[in-house]
Image (cartoon, rainbow, N blue to C red):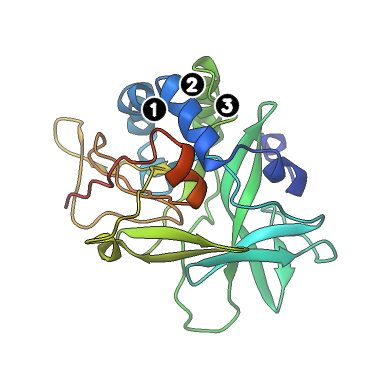
Amino acid sequence: MAEVLQPYDFGKLNRTLTIDEASYQFQTAQGPALLKNDLLQLFAKYPRMVHTFCIVLVHHHFKLKAGQALVDVSGCSTAWDLETCPTTPDGGFEKYGGYVKPRSWLISNGKLIPFEFYFDSPVQGTSKSYVDFSAGFDYGFVEEFMSVVAAHGLSDILGLSLHATHKECMLELNEPGANITFPERIKDGSKLSFGEASWGYETLDADGNFHTSGPLRKLGCRTFTKYLKGGDGTHTSEESRKSNPYANMSSTYTE
């Protein structure tokens, strides 16, 4: 079922919604209820995926030029030119002696297409930014995930993203041409508004319920959601603060 995975296409990312548009559609399509019910049950059915993936709100931060991709290095994502770089079997690229690896995937016509990447440094001893993905996708999980979100009209809105390896909750702030992550604690006393952009589940307890076990993981533009017992994801932007009716939701954080 490798045909489910498709190569990167910068045009697909450019055609995704803004954070404001995606958040609005997610809310109006009853996305929060989907997270608490059908998708929670799906992750419970595939427990290995619980520790691998978050559910991500698919959106673009800024337009990319032909041949570019959004690549994260140490918490800062910028546009990299990859058009002439050799590709890898996992949908990534080779560059600077290392690997540009996929970390987020969107759904397009029943296929998964990477739309965000991270740089896996060739330097020995360099800490890894995201969880090990060498085992690859469970395609049964992928098919069911796409079926569930399609049934709720959210195929263009929800995708999958790898968990970060660090456990501190983070916030992402946008500067022209860059997305920069900071510790969640910087929002104390801040007048900025933060909207939710990713949701993750933690482990299962003896009764089959998800629960939080220690600090929550952070992945890119994520904030912890107030209705999932275990998750992360925050996003803020000037557009969100001006026009998104859901961007003023505070980022609830529980340990």
The residue indicated by pointer 3 is 155
Residue 219: give x, y in percent of width and height.
42, 55
What type is the residue that disc 3 sits on? Ser
**Image quadrant in which you'd find residue 199:** top left
Is disc 2 placed on a helix, strand or loop?
helix
The answer to whether 98 is drawn above or below residue 194 in the figure is below
**In the visual, does 125 lie left or right of 183?**
right
Disc 2 residue crowd, few under 14, some 14–19, many 20+, Cα 10 Å: some
| Number of disc labels | 3
Residue 180: give x, y in percent of width and height.
48, 65
**Image quadrant in which you'd find residue 108:** top right
Q: Residue furthest left?
A: 206
**CB atoms of marks 2 and 1 within 8 Å:** yes
What type is the residue that disc 2 sits on? Val
Which mark sits nearer the N-terminus, 2 or 1? 1
Residue 158 in view in this figure: no
The answer to whether 8 is drawn above or below residue 107 in the figure is below
The answer to whether 251 is drawn above or below residue 15 in the figure is below
Is disc 1 placed on a helix, strand or loop?
helix
**CB atoms of marks 3 and 1 within 8 Å:** no
Q: Residue at x 46, y 70 (%)?
A: 128
What type is the residue that disc 1 sits on? Leu
Which mark identifies residue 39? 1
The residue indicated by pointer 2 is 148
Foreground: 156 or 114?
Answer: 156
Disc 1 residue crowd, few under 14, some 14–19, many 20+, Cα 10 Å: some
Question: Label 2 to label 3, Cα distance in Å?
Answer: 9 Å
Q: Residue at x 20, y 32 (%)?
A: 209
Which mark identifies residue 22? none
